[in-house]
Amino acid sequence: MYSFSKEERLCSVKLIDKLFHSGSSFLLYPFRIIWLKETLPAEKPVQVLISVPKKKFKRAVDRNLLKRRIREIYRLQKSEHLYPFLTEHSVTMILGINYIGNEIGEYSFMEKKLNAAILKLKKVYIESHVE
């Protein structure tokens, strides 16, 4: 459950396009979360795209460090908060996590904020499907 396999990564150009053009989003500094309810071919309930802008972090070393940290935090937190919620509601979705901070954040700060973002995603999903 604590793995981050190929089926969980969002690689399809069509799905990425669809995510950014018709997905819903919210900000929770230093993250921008974009999500879209979508039927997925894999047995995993969610596929994730993690991005760090080249405009703010010119050096690839810095971008890779941030992506590695975000991937690790997501990998550890998905089984606690996200997967049980999605399987309970029998939902599959695609998810984009954009880092919008201006500096490289500490691991503990990013962990706390991504956890809060996942909880907010659950809340936003429930609100959008109750109406």
Image: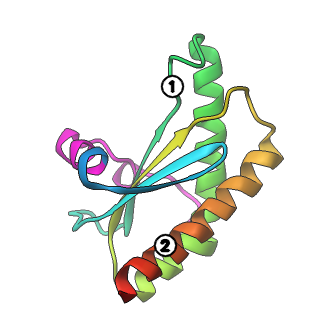
- Quadrant of the frame with the C terminus: bottom left
Which residue is at the front of the view, 33 or 76?
33
Q: Residues within 10 Å of mark 1 (few under 14, many from 20)?
A: few
> Disc 1 vs disc 2: Cβ atoms closer than 8 Å?
no
Which residue is the extreme one toward the front? Answer: 131
Q: Is residue 127 above or below residue 82?
A: below
Residue 39, given in percent of the width and then of the height, sits at 22, 68
The answer to whether any part of residue 79 appears in the image is no
Answer few, some or many: residues within 10 Å of disc 2's Cα (few below 14, many 20 plus, some between 14 and 19). Answer: some
Q: Residue at x 23, y 42 (%)?
A: 17
| Residue 49 percent across, percent down from the top left | 42, 44
Residue 130 higher or lower than 99, as above or below: below
The residue at 57%/11% (across/down) is 58
Identified by mark 1, the residue type is Pro
Q: In the figure, is residue 42 to the left or right of 4?
A: left
Residue corresponding to mark 1 = 53
**Residue 20 vertical placement versus 76 (above, below):** above
The type of residue carrying mark 2 is: Val
Q: Please give the range of residues in magenta.
A: 1-19
Query: If the image is split into quadrants, where does the N terminus sit?
Result: bottom right
Which tag is nearer the camera, tag 1 or tag 2? 2
Q: Which mark is residue 124?
A: 2
Q: Residue furthest left?
A: 14
Give the numbered dot on residue 67.
Answer: none
Spatial CA span between label 1 and label 2: 25 Å
Q: Position of residue 126 (x, y in %)?
A: 45, 82
